[in-house]
Amino acid sequence: MRQAAQCIGRVIRSKADYGIMVLADRRYVRADKKTKLPPWILTNLSEGQVDLDTDMAMGIARSFLREMSKPLPKDSQVGTALLTEEDVRRRAQTGGERDDPLGF
């Protein structure tokens, strides 16, 4: 289980990342195996996403990727952006050019 959790962790490396993790093995349906997964995985795993056939899994993945590809409404971005308001203002003034070595 540790190796599976490590592989899953490689999908998401930062706050800005998102990905799809597929555990395509019946063993992960069993409670004794599933509970050995790290808490951060278990909290993001709903019962409706367990023990799916291929078509259902593909449908969920497709919906997830469509949703993630949509731009966020401006009001929902306030307080959740990785850049501060000052970073956004500075980038707007420079036309979006990166004006420091970290790329902010």
Image (tube, rainbow, N blue to C red):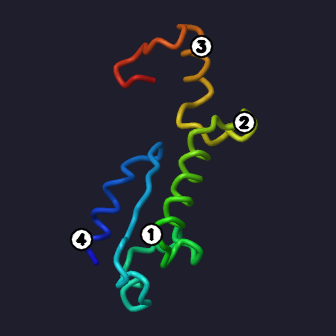
Residue 22 lies in what quarter of the image?
A: bottom left
- 98 on left or right of 56: left
Q: CA distance from mark 4 to mark 3?
A: 44 Å
Q: Earlier in the sequence, mark 1 or mark 3?
A: 1
In the image: residue 22, left or right of residue 68: left
Mark-to-mark CA distance, 1 and 3? 37 Å
* Tag 4 near tag 2, CB within 8 Å: no
Observer-side mark, 1 or 3, equals: 1
- SS class of the residue under badge 2? loop
N-terminal of the pair, mark 4 or mark 3, is 4
Name the secondary structure under disc 3: helix
Distance from Cα at disc 1 to Cα at disc 4 = 13 Å
x and y percentages locating residue 95 in the rendered image: 54, 8
Question: What residue did someone put label 4 on?
Answer: 3
Left or right position of 100 against 84: left
Task: Give the residue type that dot 4 points to.
Answer: Gln
Q: To which residue does mark 1 refer?
A: 41
Depth check, mark 3 against mark 2: the one in front is: 2
Residue plotted at (48% across, 73% down):
53
Q: Which residue is mark 3?
A: 92
Amino acid residing under circle 1: Ile
The secondary element bearing badge 1 is classed as helix
Report which residue position mark 2 lands on: 73
Residue beneath the point at 43% across and 15% down: 98
Residue in the foreground of this view, choosing between 89 and 35: 35
Above or below 98: residue 78:
below
- The residue mark sitting in front, 4 or 3, is 4
